[in-house]
Amino acid sequence: MFLSIKNIPKVYWSSDKSINFKPKFSTSFFLFFGLIIFGFGEGLLILSTNGNSPWSVLAEGISKNSKLSIGAATFLISVSVLLLWIFLKQKPGLGTIFNIIIISAMIDITLHFFDAPSSIWSKYFLSILSVILVGIGSGIYLVANLGPGPRDGLMTGLTKITNLPIALVRAFLEISVVTVGWYLGGTVGVGTLIFAFGIGPCVAFGLFIVNKIFS
């Protein structure tokens, strides 16, 4: 059952070690592909105007209280979370660095080139689709094993320490972050709840699918 997954699977294009500055082309390709899907999904959820993802709620809250764009605020948050890795004994890799850059850029690119839907049902559909995309994107880039992004590194680090399922740890983090973001003025709605409770299972499902297809 994919909800019980506790470890990141390895496939033929996974890097043998997370600290690898000369990865195979296939490894780099899937890393970038996964991160682009991840960032696109985050941007689509913001476009749905149906409630942002917890981390984007926080980014929007910071954006509203500063002159930063949501993408720039996301970049700032990612760097700040990276500092917490010191206590989890996590080491950043190429995947960690590109996660910060690509996801932040994709959010701003998506918001710039796409328009928000007008129909309420389109908004709900976009909310659900975005969570699935972020989950699948996470599964792809995590399996590349070039180092998790700041937020996913926090997730996997806490999973190792607590020995709790990835889905449970991710859900706990998302629910905690959305509380702070809402206080700062970030947009919270049905889409936020869909993301907060759905992202954990979707990440686990993404890992499961990638493992089934490529192992």
Image (spheres, grey):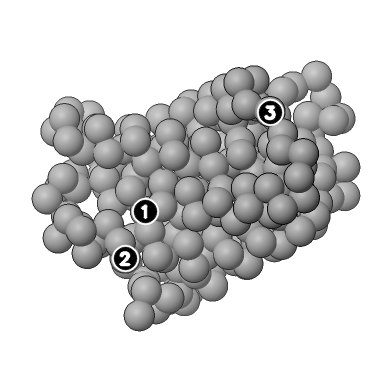
Instruction: Tell whether label 1 touches label 2 (CB within 8 Å).
Output: yes
Circle 2 sits in a helix, a strand or a loop, which is it? helix
How far is mark 3 from mark 1, CA to CA?
27 Å
Measured as percent of width and height from the top left, residue 4 is found at: 39, 78
Rendering quarter of residue 59: top right
Measured as percent of width and height from the top left, residue 167 is found at: 49, 69
In the image, is residue 109 above or below residue 162?
A: above
Amino acid tagged 2 = Phe
Circle 3 sits in a helix, a strand or a loop, which is it? loop
Task: Quarter of the image for the C terminus: give it.
Answer: bottom left
Q: Which is in the foreground here, disc 3 or disc 1? A: 3
Residue that appears at 25% across and 32% down: 29
Residue 208 numbered mark, or none: 2
Residue that appears at 52% across and 65% down: 200
Circle 1 sits in a helix, a strand or a loop, which is it? helix
Give whichever of discs 2 and 1 has the lower sequence position: 1
Measured as percent of width and height from the top left, residue 180 is found at: 79, 52
Amino acid tagged 1 = Gly
Residue 139 numbered mark, or none: 1
Q: Nearer the viewer, residue 111 or 126?
A: 126
Q: Is residue 151 left or right of residue 8?
A: right
Give whichever of discs 3 and 1 has the lower sequence position: 3
Task: Quarter of the image for the N terminus: give it.
Answer: bottom left
Sort mark 3 into few (<14), some (14-19) or many (20+) by Cα contacts within 10 Å.
few
Amino acid tagged 3 = Asp
Q: Is residue 26 left or right of residue 94?
A: left
Residue that appears at 70% across and 42% down: 48
In the image, is residue 128 above or below residue 70?
A: below
| Residue on which the image places disc 3 | 115
Q: Nearer the viewer, residue 183 or 103?
A: 103
Question: In this view of the protein, can residue 87 be seen by the observer?
Answer: no
How far is mark 2 from mark 3, CA to CA?
32 Å
